[in-house]
């Protein structure tokens, strides 16, 4: 049985509005080291907005987000990434004309110590550094079992494999906290099973803490340690999968009263 550590991400009283529209209202929850923490809720519940607050895309009007004891205010996504937070996106933001290898290499940018001048010259220290970074990327490609496609332009791959490349690019950043925005959307059953396996392996073998948005309740109940439930931008449930599944509020809002 895996060991869950102390709190590494603390979300306190987050409120976010666009004009007069409230996206999130007074949301609080925490994420513990080495757990898989799911965020669920109907469409429009505020799940992606919550991830956007965590990784610096949106700046909430109220509340605070603390990562490993450091509270961040007004940080850009890059600054949050430098703190060890990586993210995949619901709508793939891959470079479709570039190979699998080159797409995953873009995730190593934060790890590059040599400036653009050296990289452009591609000599000496920059060449050695790129070689080291490429080795790391090859390990990720092996881990995700996409060796056969390493030189294939991403746009030619089936959707399920593109999602895997997106995960690979996030892993290339060597995050301590990985945010997954609907990693299984649009997948068939076999692709979902593969992605579940990779997520659990990332959590287990790399020790990466994962925050996951997912609509497939079967997946959420199978792989999550704890679940937070949002509805219309408010928190209506928080706890172990079994507790959440039995909550009246969650059944009404998410599963439908008939369940």
Image: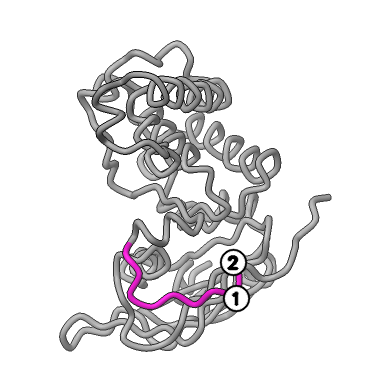
Image position of 206 (left or right of 79): right
Measuring 51% from the left and 55% from the top, which residue is drawn there?
A: 84
Mark 1, residues whose alpha carbon is within 10 Å: few (<14), some, or many (≥20)? many
Report the residue marked by disc 1: 238
Report the residue marked by disc 2: 227
Q: Quadrant of residue 103?
A: top left
Report if residue 241 is visible in the image.
no
Measuring 38% from the left and 26% from the top, which residue is drawn there?
A: 126
Image position, residue 221 (x, y; %):
62, 56
Q: Are marks 1 and 2 in contact (CB under 8 Å)?
A: yes
Report if residue 43 is visible in the image.
yes
Measuring 45% from the left and 51% from the top, which residue is drawn there?
A: 86
Q: CA distance from mark 1 to mark 2?
A: 6 Å
Residue extending farthest to the front is: 124
As displayed, is residue 218 above or below residue 40?
above
| Helix, strand or loop: magenta stretch | loop
Question: Considering only order in the chain, which callout, 2 or 1, is on the residue closer to the N terminus?
Answer: 2
Mark 2, residues whose alpha carbon is within 10 Å: few (<14), some, or many (≥20)? many
Image position, residue 139 (x, y; %):
56, 24
- Magenta-span inclusion, residue 186: no
- Magenta-span inclusion, residue 69: yes
- Residue situated in front as seen by the camera: 47 or 236: 47
Measuring 59% from the left and 61% from the top, which residue is drawn there?
A: 37
Image position, residue 81 (x, y; %):
42, 55
Q: Quadrant of residue 49?
A: bottom left
Question: Magenta part of the protein: which range?
Answer: 68-76
Image position, residue 176 (x, y; %):
58, 52
Query: Which structural element holds mark 2?
Result: strand
Query: Which structural element holds mark 1?
Result: strand
């Amino acid at each position: 049985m895996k060991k869950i550590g102390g709190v590494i991400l603390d979300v306190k009283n987050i409120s976010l509005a666009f004009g007069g529209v409230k996206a999130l209202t007074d949301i609080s929850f925490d994420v513990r080291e080495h757990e898989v923490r799911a965020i669920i809720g109907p469409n429009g519940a505020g799940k992606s907005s919550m991830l956007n607050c965590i990784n610096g895309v949106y700046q909430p009007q109220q509340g605070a987000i603390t990562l490993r004891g450091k509270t961040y205010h007004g940080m850009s996504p890059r600054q949050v990434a430098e703190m060890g937070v990586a993210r995949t996106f619901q709508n793939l933001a891959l470079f479709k004309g570039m190979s699998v290898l080159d797409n995953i290499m873009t995730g190593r940018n934060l790890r590059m110590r040599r400036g653009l001048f050296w990289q452009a010259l591609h000599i000496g220290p920059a060449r050695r550094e790129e070689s080291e970074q490429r080795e790391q990327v090859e390990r990720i490609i092996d881990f995700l079992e996409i060796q056969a496609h390493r030189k294939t332009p991403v746009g030619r791959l089936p959707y399920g494999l593109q999602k895997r490349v997106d995960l690979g690019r996030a892993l290339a950043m060597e995050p301590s906290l990985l945010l997954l925005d609907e990693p299984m959307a649009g997948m068939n059953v076999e692709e979902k099973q593969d992605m579940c396996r990779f997520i659990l392996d990332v959590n287990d073998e790399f020790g990466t803490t994962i925050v996951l948005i997912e609509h497939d309740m079967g997946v959420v109940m199978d792989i999550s340690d704890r679940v937070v439930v949002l509805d219309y931008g408010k928190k209506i449930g928080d706890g172990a999968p079994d507790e959440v599944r039995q909550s009246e509020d969650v059944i009404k809002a998410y599963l439908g009263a008939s369940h």
